[in-house]
Image: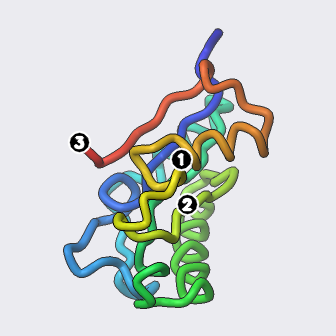
Amino acid sequence: MPITTLFIDRDGVINQDSPDYIKTAEAFHFLPRSPEAFALMKAHRLSGMVITNQSIIGRGWVTEETLTAIFKKMVTGIEEAGGHVDDIFFCPHTPDDDCACRKPKPGLIMEACRTHGIDPADSVMRSAMV
């Protein structure tokens, strides 16, 4: 079966990562050509799902409203480049929470597969995590 879905990490793959975390829309800066990569995915009929750890919520550093504004900036930039984000799934927990949704655990990917009827065998994950 051909690949139909790409699960893509946000920080370090779509945008420049920061040791201070991305806490505002103003701090979000695309990596070179990452919005255009979504346009290529769209042209090849690949779904793009963002799968991202966002412990800034669990740490109380930002609200979900602020995170939504950051995501909006990301999606707008990708759409302006001709791409599309099919959905965004995020883990709000801290590493100490030991939840099932925090990458590298597969919880968010499995949720995306259930939500969108994706066969995991037809997908790949691109992450900045080692």
Say which quadrant the C terminus sits in: top left
Relative horizontal placement of residue 12, taking residue 89 as reference (left or right): left
How many numbered callouts? 3
User: Is residue 12 positioned above or below 39 on the image?
Assistant: below
Verify CB contact (< 8 Å) between mark 3 and mark 1.
Answer: no
Q: Which residue position is annotated with label 2?
A: 78
Distance, label 3 to label 1, CA atoms, is 22 Å
| Residue drawn where x is 27% and y is 66% of the image | 17
Where's residue 47, x and y in %?
Answer: 65, 39
Q: Which residue position is annotated with label 1?
A: 38
Lower position in the chain sequence, tag 3 or tag 2:
2
Q: Which residue position is annotated with label 3?
A: 130
Where's residue 54, x and y in %?
Answer: 45, 69
Among all residues in the image, which is located at the extreme top? 1
Q: In which quarter of the image is residue 5?
A: top right
Verify CB contact (< 8 Å) between mark 1 and mark 2.
Answer: yes
Among all residues in the image, which is located at the extreme left? 19
42 vs 20, nearest the viewer = 20
Q: Circle 2 — which element?
A: helix
Lower position in the chain sequence, tag 1 or tag 2:
1
Inspect the image, locate mark 2, and give the three-letter code of the amino acid beneath it.
Ile
| Residue drawn where x is 23% and y is 81% of the image | 20
| Disc sitting over residue 121 in the figure | none
Relative horizontal placement of residue 112, taking residue 105 as reference (left or right): right
Inspect the image, locate mark 3, and give the three-letter code of the amino acid beneath it.
Val
13 vs 58, nearest the viewer = 58
| Residue drawn where x is 30% and y is 57% of the image | 12
User: Within 10 angstroms of label 1, few (less than 14), some, or many (20 or more) residues?
Assistant: many
